Amino acid sequence: MNNNNYKKIKNFGGNISTPIDNPLSYCLQDGLNQKFLHGSSSSHITPQSNECKLFMSQYCAKNWDGFCEYAYSNKNSQFTIGAAPSTIGGIQSNSLGNTLLLDTAKEKYLKSMQNCCRVSIPFDPTVAMSPNITYWKNSSGLTCIPTYEIDPDVIDDDIVMNKILANPAPYISLLKNIYRSMKSDGSLNAETFKKTKLGIFFNNARSMLS
């Protein structure tokens, strides 16, 4: 297992004509400044919007940088029914920062998705060079079933997983999925993995994860 197994994320921002049109300028600030910057046609795209949740999770899955850290520090709460397209099912109340971390992890560790397909749309349809974002679309009527996996050789240095393990409660469903996936393919009992921070957590929380 290696990083090449992770779901590929497109490069963002390479063809954006001006810094104002960069999705980060929509997703890292809110209020009047953001609305004056982008105009009324894009006023619905805010840090709380589905567009920003999708963009930021896909951006941060590729490389967790200072912009991701800033967005993660947003402790404003949200209430989501049915969830954003990037979050499959459920009703949750959570901070924007925790939601970003969860959605980033779901992008980064995704191995496969059953019953759904990726759909690509422009981040901001009013901007000609706006990059595309993707979401999962269910056209079969069946529930989307994701499978997640990690690379045990680098997981100890993975900033996203380290943040999850520092406060695992909001991310238990994702951790259960990874645990069951590793148990199924036999990698859960590898001696090298058992010594990792995630391996130690799995061992200590075995009864909760099974």
Image (cartoon, rainbow, N blue to C red):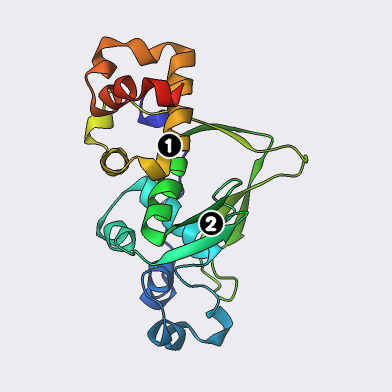
In the image, residue 132 lies at what x, y percent?
A: 54, 59
Q: Give the left or right position of residue 95, taking residue 157 as reference.
A: right
Q: Residue at x 52, y 62 (%)?
A: 79
Q: Is residue 95 above or below residue 176?
A: below
Q: Which mark is residue 172?
A: 1
Q: Nearer the viewer, residue 68 or 77?
A: 77
In the image, residue 195 lies at what x, y percent?
A: 21, 19
Q: Which mark is residue 133?
A: 2
Find the distance from the CA under tag 1 to the CA under tag 2.
26 Å
Q: Is residue 162 above or below residue 204?
A: below
Q: Amino acid at mark 1?
A: Ile
Quadrant assignment, res 26: bottom left
Q: Which mark is residue 143?
A: none
Give the SS element for disc 1. helix
Q: Residue at x 43, y 19 (%)?
A: 182
Q: Nearer the viewer, residue 93 or 89?
A: 93
Which quarter shows the N terminus?
Answer: top left
